[in-house]
Amino acid sequence: MNTSRANLRAQGPTIHDLTDEQWQCIAPLLPEMLDHGPRRGRPNIDTRWVLNSVMWVLHTRAPWSAMPERYVPYQTAHRYYLRWKKSGVLSAIALALFKTETILERRATRKSEARAE
């Protein structure tokens, strides 16, 4: 069965996805949500869906490459994660949502940690 990501998203949110109330609280913290006028280049990606993807990895502690198909490609989510972490946006989001940054202390990896020593 060939199911597109859009169809998977249309099935509804999972327990790791942001509620509408949470999204309204943190949307102003995201630089991508600020209106900078007309853009050129690549089309905009759904920032809420990117954040849902990042939150899935942070909550599950799974490797980026294990993200379910319903989310954005893991490379996209990881790129935004690195950008938001470096700029402090992810800390502001964690504080707004959870009143603590402990979710960011969890190591979110790109590949499986299982290696022979």
Image (spheres, rainbow, N blue to C red):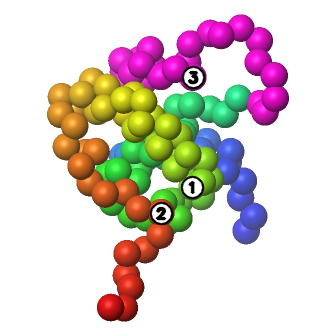
User: Residue type at mark 2?
Assistant: Arg
The answer for how far apart the CA atoms under marks 2 and 3 are is 23 Å
Residue at left 39%, top 44%?
55
Q: Mark 2 — residue?
A: 110
Name the side, left or right, on which 96 lies relative to 72: left
Q: Mark 3 — residue?
A: 32
Q: Are marks 1 and 3 in contact (CB under 8 Å)?
A: no
The answer for how far apart the CA atoms under marks 2 and 1 are is 9 Å
Task: Return the x and y of residue 90 as percentages of the image width and height.
Answer: 37, 33
User: Residue type at mark 1?
Assistant: Tyr
Name the side, left or right, on which 14 lies relative to 9: left
What's drawn in magenta, residue-wise?
17-43
Name the side, left or right, on which 27 lies relative to 3: left
Tell me where residue 62 sits by quadrant.
Answer: bottom left
Q: Are marks 2 and 1 in contact (CB under 8 Å)?
A: yes
Tell me the SS state at disc 1. Answer: helix
Above or below, 93 against 24 in this view is below
Q: Nearer the viewer, residue 73 or 105?
A: 105
Q: Mark 1 — residue?
A: 74
Image quarter hosting the C terminus:
bottom left
Name the side, left or right, on which 83 lies relative to 90: right
